[in-house]
Amino acid sequence: MADAEPPAELRAALRQLEEHLGRSLSDASDGHARWELYRAALGAETARPALLAAVAAEPDGALASGVVGEALEGLPRTERDAWVQALAPEVRGFSERRVRELGVLEDLRSGALAAAGVPELIDAWSDWLQLRLATESDDATVLRALAASGRTKRIRRTAGESLG
């Protein structure tokens, strides 16, 4: 089922995406068709500016939020806030939290966040971040803290298994 005709700003951004990707959008008023175009654009770094413009003009907040959620991890840290700010304020919450948690993940990997501080921080982390660290971290301090204090049985078990 087609939605209302998209605003001119979105139509212009969609045309740019079509040019970058070399493909046509079947129906710009169809949110599912736009999602498919956005998904294709996520894999093309050269399409990133046009995709950001489309997100900013996208009237479907859930669709825009989904695109940003998919994009965040592949973006340089310095660009993530611009993508979150492109969202309508009422749909930013998830993406804002994901940006913070990706920062924690990267800081732990780089050593900018000391593993010794993890036990005090775990309770504020989402299940996603805890499980991600339980599966990816090789730091024994982080894994012990998650094995002891992870929010779910799955997180605690995974961290324990990762400890060896």
Image (cartoon, grey):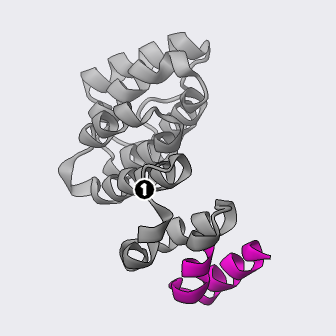
Q: What residue is disc 1 on?
A: 113
Q: Position of residue 46 (x, y in %)?
A: 52, 15
Q: Between 76 and 36, which is closer to the camera in this rendering?
A: 76
> Relative to 136, is 89 on the left or the right?
left
Q: Position of residue 108 (x, y in %)?
A: 50, 55
> Relative to 15, is 109 on the left or the right?
right
Q: Position of residue 79 (x, y in %)?
A: 36, 31
Q: Residue at x 49, y 30 (%)?
A: 27
Q: Between 28 and 116, which is closer to the camera in this rendering?
A: 116
**Number of numbered discs overlaid on the protein picture:** 1
Image height check: is 92 above or below 20?
Answer: below
Q: Position of residue 65 (x, y in %)?
A: 38, 49
Q: Quadrant of the C terminus?
A: bottom right
Q: Residue at x 26, y 28 (%)?
A: 7
- Residue interval drawn in magenta: 143-164
- Magenta stretch: dominant secondary structure: helix
Q: Residue at x 46, y 39 (%)?
A: 30
Q: Is 14 inside the magenta-drawn segment?
A: no
